[in-house]
Image (cartoon, rainbow, N blue to C red):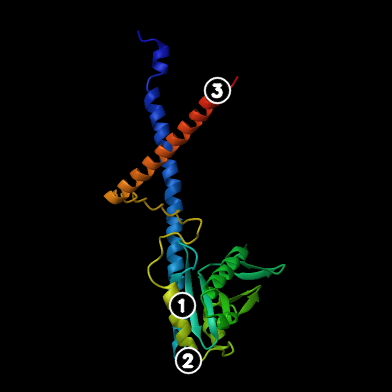
Amino acid sequence: MVPRSSVRFAGAGAAAKAREHAARAEELRRELTRVEREQRNWEAGAEGERLVAEALAVLEADGWTVLHDVRWPGRQRANVDHVAIGPGGVVVVDSKNWTGVVSSRDDELRVGGRPVARELTGVAAATSAVTAHVPARHRRDVLGVLCLVQQPVPAREVGVVTVVGRNAVADLLRALPPVLGPREVARVVDVLARELTGPPLDEALTTADVPAPRPAARRPAPVRPVRSRPRRTVRRRRAVLGALVRAVLAVAALLVAVVVLALLSAP
């Protein structure tokens, strides 16, 4: 007869493994949910940028040039959605494909009930980074814009950033007072295209990230050949040394003679 205690523990190891795999499966489900959510966000962002690019494309007839998906100066893993250069100056546009109603509460802008202060700060930072590459005399003509893809709202200023719906973004840029002529627009486009477009930079962008230069290897000092001295010089030095030795001996002999005479003349 099998003891009841043994029956009670039957399958304990398999049950423990089952619980371990169940926990792992739940962890993977949560990870999958997170990745799928991020995928949807990225897809929505890409679609939003495409729609805003189409809205800005109509400005080409008015002398504007728009650069899309350019580097964020000073950052390795960040980009700027759109930079428009035209008669009204330079406009940095960040597209946001959010859902929800736009509202203001206590001088705070909200979209779908969520405050967007952090995103507005990001637009201001991107605008400042781009401004640093604009020719100095045109830096006061740079504007930061947060463009809402799904919300048809008129332009409004929130701090240093202008918030506008995609439906009104082209009209906003057209309404800017002219500050750049065609030649100046072409020059600014050339400068920003050179500085902001191209493959992303993988190398460090700050001095703190740049490794210290390796010290140059020291080259061994060249071995100078020993030059043999001319025979005349050697002979001359030997003659001088011999004369000194003879003089010393003569002085010593004189001193000895003086001492001997002094001893003999003593009473």
Q: Is residue 7 above or below residue 35?
A: above
Q: How far across and how far down the image is residue 233, in percent? A: 32, 50
For the residues labelled 1 and 2, say whether their Cβ atoms are less than 8 Å apart.
Answer: no
The mark that comes first in sequence, 1 or 2, is: 2
The quarter of the picture where the C terminus appears is top right
The mark that comes first in sequence, 1 or 3, is: 1
Tell me how far mark 1 sits from mark 2, CA to CA.
15 Å
For the residues labelled 2 and 3, say whether their Cβ atoms are less than 8 Å apart.
Answer: no
Q: Amino acid at mark 1?
A: Leu
Q: Please name the residue that numbered disc 2 is placed on.
A: 182
Within 10 Å of disc 1 (Cα), the crowding (few <14, some 14-19, many 20+) is some
For the residues labelled 1 and 3, say whether their Cβ atoms are less than 8 Å apart.
Answer: no
Q: Amino acid at mark 3?
A: Leu
The quarter of the picture where the N terminus appears is top left
Q: How far across and how far down the image is residue 187, in percent? A: 46, 85
Residue occupying the far top of the picture: 1
Within 10 Å of disc 3 (Cα), the crowding (few <14, some 14-19, many 20+) is few
Tag of residue 192: 1
Nearest to the eye among marks 2 and 3: give it. Answer: 3
Instruction: Please identify the quarter of the rendering in which residue 119 is found.
Output: bottom right
Instruction: Please identify the quarter of the rendering in which residue 116 is found.
Output: bottom right
